[in-house]
Amino acid sequence: MPNTPLPSLPEQKADEARQLPSFRDFSLPGFRDHITELLGMIGHAGIFQTYTRHDITHIDAMLGLLKWIVPPQTKDKMTPADWLLTVLAIYLHDLGMLVTQQEFDQRMSNSAYRSWLENLNREDGDRDYLARTKRMTPDEQDRFFFQEYVRLYHATRIREWITNSHSRQWSPEFNGAVAEVHRLLSSLPSRFREHLGTVCESHHLDDLEDPVRFPLFALVGTYREQESVNVQYAAILLRTADLLHVTRDRTPSVMFKLIKFTDPKGVSEWEKQRATFSVTHRGRKLDPDDPTTAEILVEADFTEERPLFALQEYIVYANAQVEQSKRWADKSQEKRDGKDYCFPWRGVTGDVRLEGVRPHKLKFELDRGRLLDLLVGHTLYNDPTVAIRELLQNAIDAATGAISTCARQH
C-alpha cells in the first residue's frame, strides 16, 4: 500500500519526529493509511451504524481545527514529539468504538457487560436508555445496549489497546484491531505509548489538572530538547477539537436518507449537526488586544425548532468545557514548563437562526414588588394564622436540626 501524503500542517510537523533517534523507525504516513482502514470499519457490525461519522473525515476535520486552535506562538514552541502525540491521539481517540461481529456475538461472556446490563434500570440516569428502546425490535435492542456500553467505555478501551494492558472488562481475542494497533505502535518508545494512551482516554475525563497523569514536561527519549511532550496540552487540544467538530460535513445527506433510525436521539443529533455550517473564532484572526476574537463562534441555520434547541444546549455544554480547558491551561502557564503552551479561547457562543425569524435581542425584567407580594402577601396564605403556623413550624424544624447536629458532634 503506498503511503498517502500527509495533508495537514499538524501531521507534517508530527512527521518531523522521524528525524529524532527515538522515533526514526515510525512512519506516520504508513500509520495514517492503516488507521484510515480501521476507522472505516466502525459501524460494520451494526454497532454505531447510526452514529455521525467517526472515520478519517472526522480526523481530518479535527486536524483542520488545530490550525487556529493552537495560537502561532505556541505552534513555534511545540516539539515534534508534542505534535506526534497530539496527532496520534486524534487518530486513535475513537478507535475503541470498533466492534467486530465476533465480539458482539460473544458479548455475554463479558462479565463486566453482564453486570452493567443487570444494573441498567437501577439508576435514574439509566431510564433514558430504556425509554430510547421502545420503538426497537429485540435484535435492535441487543445491539443498542452493547453499543452504549462500548460508547461509555471506549476511551478506556483504546487506552488498553495502546498500552497492551487489558482488563477483564474487554475480550481482546475477539477483536483483531487490538493486535493491529499494538503492532503499528510497537516502534514507539514505551513511555510515549503510555502518555498516548492517557491522552486518548482523557477526552472522557475531567482530571487534566493531575500533574502525575498529565505532566507539563515529560521526556520520552534521550534527545531532551525535542523528545519531550506536554501531556496536558495534548489532552486539551484533543478534547477541544473533538468537541468542536459538529458541522454538517459529519452528517452527509445521503447517509441520513439511507440510515434506518429507531433511536429519536440519533435523529436529533444528525439534525443538529446538519444545520451547523461553521465553527471558528470571531474576527479574521486572533487579536491579543481584542478579547472578543478569543471567543469560538458556532453558526447554524434551522428550519424547525427542535434541533435548534438541541444545538443551543450543546453550545452551553461546549462553553463550559472550553472555559474549563482555559482554566487548566492558564494555571499551567504560571509554571515554568507550561509557560509556552497558550490556550487563548475564553468560551463558545452561537449565531443560531431559525428560517423566517429575524434574530433580535430579548430583554426580561423582574417585577420585584409583585414577586415579594406573591411570596409574603395574602395571595399565598389567605388566612394569616396559616402563615404564622408555617413560621413556627420552620423555627421548630431549624431548632430540631441544630440539636441533632450538636448531639452527633458530642
Image (cartoon, rainbow, N blue to C red):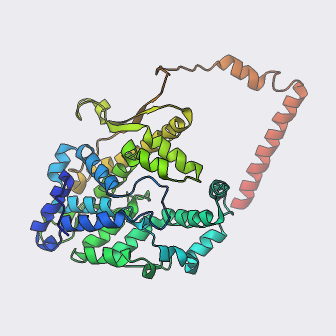
Q: Say which of 124 and 107 sits in front.
A: 107
Q: Residue at x 76, y 52 (%)?
A: 403
Q: Is residue 316 left or right of residue 278?
A: right
Q: Quadrant of the C terminus?
A: bottom right
Q: Quadrant of residue 86?
A: bottom left
Q: Please state which of residues 321 and 259 is positioned toward the viewer in this rendering.
A: 259
Q: Is residue 252 visible?
A: yes
Residue 350 position by quadrant: top left
Please give the name of the residue rendered at 75% of the width and 50% of the height, measured from the top-left corner. Answer: 401
| Position of residue 298 measured from the top left corner of the image (x, y, whole percent) | 39, 36
- Say which residue appears at 46% left-offset and 78% top-offset: 167
Q: Let me know if residue 226 appears in the view.
A: no
Residue 371 image position (x, y, % from top left): 70, 22
Is residue 132 toward the left or the right of residue 85 in the image?
A: right
Q: Is residue 119 above or below residue 267?
A: below
Horizontal side, residue 281 vs residue 272: left or right: left
Position of 19 relative to 346 (above/below): below
Query: Which of these two is toward me, 214 or 351?
Result: 351
Q: Is residue 228 above or below residue 238?
A: below
Residue 409 image position (x, y, % from top left): 69, 60
Q: Compared to 141, does 243 lie above or below?
A: above
Give left or right: position of 181 versus 363.
left
